[in-house]
Image (spheres, rainbow, N blue to C red):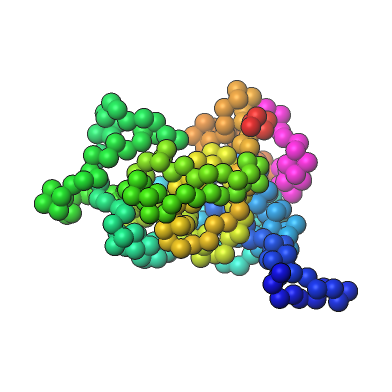
Amino acid sequence: MMTAWQDGDGQPVAVDEIVDKLATTRFAPSPTGLLHLGHAWSAVQAHDLARAANGRFLLRIEDIDAARSRDEHVAAILADLAWLGLEWDGPVLFQSQRLATYGSALERLRQAGLVYRCFCTRAEIAASASAPHGSEGPVYPGTCRRLTAAEERADEPHCWRIDMAAATARAGPLTWHDAHAGTVSADPMAAGDVVLARKDAPSSYHLSVVVDDAAQGVTDIVRGTDLFDATHVHRVLQALLDLPTPRYHHHALLVGSDGERLAKRRGAPTLAAMRAAGEDGHALAQRLRQGQLPLGFAVAAP
Ligand code: GLU
């Protein structure tokens, strides 16, 4: 047991117990569209986990996709959270202001020989008949992995991909913990050589999320099971960049009456529309806490 604080009764309290109670969670939406009920479901859980632990609930705007991110969506996100009664702690972190930090992390991986430039277009990757599908679409077939310096056209548009075989060999066997799934063996090879810096941005979701969760001291990541497989990739990046591994709480997704998960593009009712219609956001959040969903919605079976 580490050095102890004293609690109110003068009883010693182990430091690790205190740390355990001080969970830091975050809600990290991308402002590429309006939030829907599934986001509220996720945000309530992240918020409540932090509050139950006397911890912090942070808000991070994942806006590295400059072409698709909109200021009006950021404004709507802030208004939605206030409407739901979910107060976040501290300043809002915008990923678009942290590109240099992600660049440094990429540079570290580049110097370790674990990333490479990729010049392939989406169409070329899709056309590669052998490409198996992972949770993010076709697994990259590795076309650019072994380009020689002479073959590289560094002045042409390119992204940076992780050499996942080399990365997993370097990192060794890894595990992570999920509140529902228990101890999970990391299996990043299934995702393949994912993109760490996009053609149009000096980072990607995977790289920035790992860097920021560490920078913000996030101890508990509450997010939907749609990102469960991404965690295998995140775990490897944490190992390679010497970052701590948070605890994960991948929760079941909300689905519509057709059993399909809610997504912005499928016309799920937005929180902004509910707000505009005069619905009570605090009451909605309370019902979500009790597992009561509006008609036509359900929690997906695990
Ligand atoms: N920005 C991601 C999204 O909107 C969520 C990232 C995360 O929770 O790790 O889907």
Taking the image as shown, residue 122 lies to the left or right of residue 94, namely: left
Q: Position of residue 70 (x, y in %)?
A: 45, 51
Give the image location of residue 216, x and y in percent. 54, 64
**Up-down relation of residue 218 to residue 7 (above or below):** above
Residue in the image at 71% along x and 76% along y: 3
Residue 48 location (% of width, % of height): 71, 53
Image quarter in which the C terminus is found: top right
Q: Would residue 96 be seen by someone viewing this image from the given angle? A: no
Q: Can you give x and y, in whole percent of width and height, for residue 51 in the image?
A: 73, 58
Left or right, 51 with respect to 235, comes to: right
Quarter holding the N terminus is bottom right
Give the magenta part as a residue range: 279-297
Task: Using the rendered view, name the quadrant where residue 261 is placed.
Answer: top right
Asked whether 287 falls inside the magenta stretch, the response is yes
| Residue at the image position 75 percent from the left and 44 percent from the top | 289
Residue at coordinates 66% horizontally, 46% vertically from top-left? 179
